[in-house]
Amino acid sequence: MAEVEPLRALHYDLDRTGGLQDVVAPPYDVIAPEQRAELEARSPYNVVRIDLPVGADPYATAAQQLEGWRTAGVIVRDEQPALWALEQDYVGPDGSQRRRRGFLARVRVEEYGPGRIRPHERTHPGPKEDRLNLTRATKANLSPIFSLFDDPQGIATAALERTAQLEPWGQATDEDATVNRVWRVTDPGSIAELTGAVSPAELLIADGHHRYETARVYADEVGGDGPHRYVLMCLVSLQDPGLTVFPTHRLLRDLRPDQHEALAEAIRRDFEVHPLEDTAELAPTYGQPVRMGYIDAHFRQPYMLTLKDPAVAEAALADHAEPYRRLDTAVLEALVLKGALKMTDEDIDHMAGLDYARDFEHALKLVQTGVRDAAFFVAPTPIEEVRAVAGAGESMPPKSTYFFPKVPTGLLFNPLDG
């Protein structure tokens, strides 16, 4: 079982910063350069200055900035351990209003394994060294990992609902109009309920695989026991009504003539091809047999592709567990990306000839205007399928899920040096 504990957090002194609104930021890996500049301009204390540092030696700059804020009392350390409840009111990409609740804690870093902590998808290799260098310099977790746990009795849900009746410690509304409210939980009974609800559960990493793998490397690098053996996590119940998963679509670019031919041949061979009257019909629903929307820049005719025979996927993915063979992203990777287009794992990891898009309309426009050669539109993967794949010891293909909303950076930090 995972070890989940309250922490003596580092956090902003909201009297010094004027609240959370101008100092929090999205996770580092979704911030474009122009957005970074805008965030930095909001406040001399915006977290982007330490979580996405710039300069000749960005990591040293981040460490100096963090230490300067601590010395000036802009960032302070709690005297007593606490958990931190998080409530997010948001409108999802599907236009529906929802509320998601969870809590932030420190979690002991372990190897992946049954009953403890599992990944849910493969990760691109690039950002790990960057996050490791930042952790070495700042000796802190600046951004939480987003993980899921099973709470069938609703113990954590009930505790979080009671906490949400109180006045929040801080609040911030992000660029997606998500309202984030935070409470510091110091009541021993509430802490016991929340940690007790998680203690028998397996944790499934939803977002932040790079940060978790970085934390494992850093913990072993420092060696011995201590606070460096823990990592900051935001924990959300799998039963939370506000927990949603949205799709990430696949875009192809820079296809050679022979690849165009191979793609067309693979589609005709392995899929039933159904012309659609409207591009709005390109968004499929999840189920069996595997279905996905398709459009290319040459004909611009939308199609729904339906796998002709599950045996095709079973043969192509014979070395994978049955839940994995049901995934549309896995079938697409095996039959199209690796099969027809001969992409290697390295090509996919480095996105050679491949892009991802979370926004349906944006992906469609890129193909219709010829900026990208083709697009495959996939369905959102149900939480139950994510759990089944992880439970089988498998990791989904990169960008198979899109958990929305993101957990902001800057709500609090986990010190690793004492």
Image (cartoon, rainbow, N blue to C red):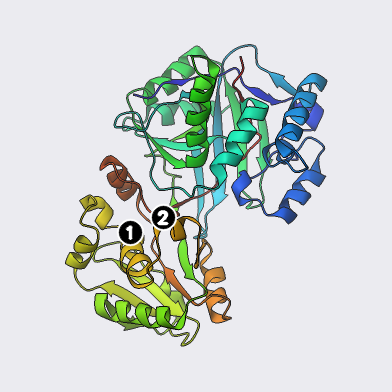
Other residues around mark 2 within 10 Å, as few (<14) / some (14–19) / many (≥20): many
Q: Name the amino acid type tagged 1.
A: Ala
Q: Which residue appears at 29% of the width and 47% of the height?
A: 389
Front residue (pair 391, 372): 372
Q: Residue at x 28, y 41 (%)?
A: 393
The image quadrant where one finds the C terminus is top right
Q: Which amino acid, by three-letter code, is at mark 2?
A: Ser
Check whether the beta carbons of the residues at disc 1 and disc 2 lie within 8 A of each other: yes
Left or right for 414, reference 393: right
Q: Position of residue 141 (x, y in %)?
A: 59, 29
How far is disc 1 from disc 2 in space, using C-alphas? 9 Å
Residue behind mark 1: 330
Residue named by callout 2: 400
Closer mark to the observer between disc 1 and disc 2: 1
Q: Is residue 372 left or right of residue 18?
A: left
Whether residue 247 appears in this view of the structure is no
Would residue 418 be seen by someone viewing this image from the given angle? yes
Under circle 2, the secondary element is: loop
